[in-house]
Image: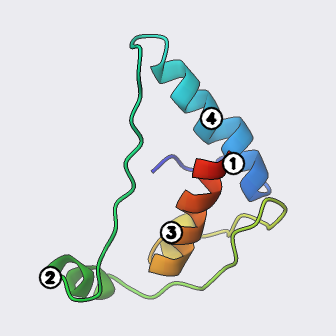
Amino acid sequence: MLKPIFCKTFEDYAKDVFLPYIDNQLKTCSRVDVVWDEYREDSMKASTCGKHGKGIRRRVQADSAIPGNWESFLCIDDNKTELFTHLSEQ
């Protein structure tokens, strides 16, 4: 995952980090497929991921502040789902 260095909001993250990264990848190829990972509740990966630690639930909206601890934010599946939805819409 691309870290949100110098980003204050999720809109900044999409505009200043994620989309420029995708644009840069398109300079060397004709197509980029973005695939989001998903942990289903009944999978072994989900139970393993759940042991890595607890994070804080944050709502992902364009004007929402980026959390200080990015890794902790990404520990919550709902956070990732909303983040990936937001990035897909951008």
N-terminal of the pair, mark 3 or mark 1, is: 1
Q: Mark 1 points at which residue?
A: 13
Q: Nearer the viewer, residue 84 or 50?
A: 84
Above or below, 49 against 63 in this view is below
Query: Label 2, label 4: how many angstroms apart (C-alpha)?
Result: 32 Å
Query: Label 1, label 2: how many angstroms apart (C-alpha)?
Result: 31 Å
Q: Which of 70 and 29 is in front in this view?
A: 29
Position in image of residue 20 (x %, y %): 62, 29
- Disc 3 residue type (three-letter): Lys
N-terminal of the pair, mark 1 or mark 2, is: 1
Which of label 1 and label 2 is nearer to you?
A: 2
Which of label 3 and label 1 is nearer to you?
A: 3
Residue furthest to the top in view is: 28
N-terminal of the pair, mark 2 or mark 3, is: 2
Q: Which mark is residue 44?
A: 2
Position in image of residue 15 (x %, y %): 73, 39
Please name the residue shown 53% across and 30% down the image. Answer: 22
Picture quadrant of residue 34? top left
Query: Label 4, label 3: how many angstroms apart (C-alpha)?
Result: 17 Å
- Disc 1 residue type (three-letter): Tyr
- On the question of residue 57 being in view, the answer is yes
Which of label 1 and label 4 is nearer to you?
A: 4
- On the question of residue 7 being in view, the answer is no
Q: Mark 4 points at which residue?
A: 19
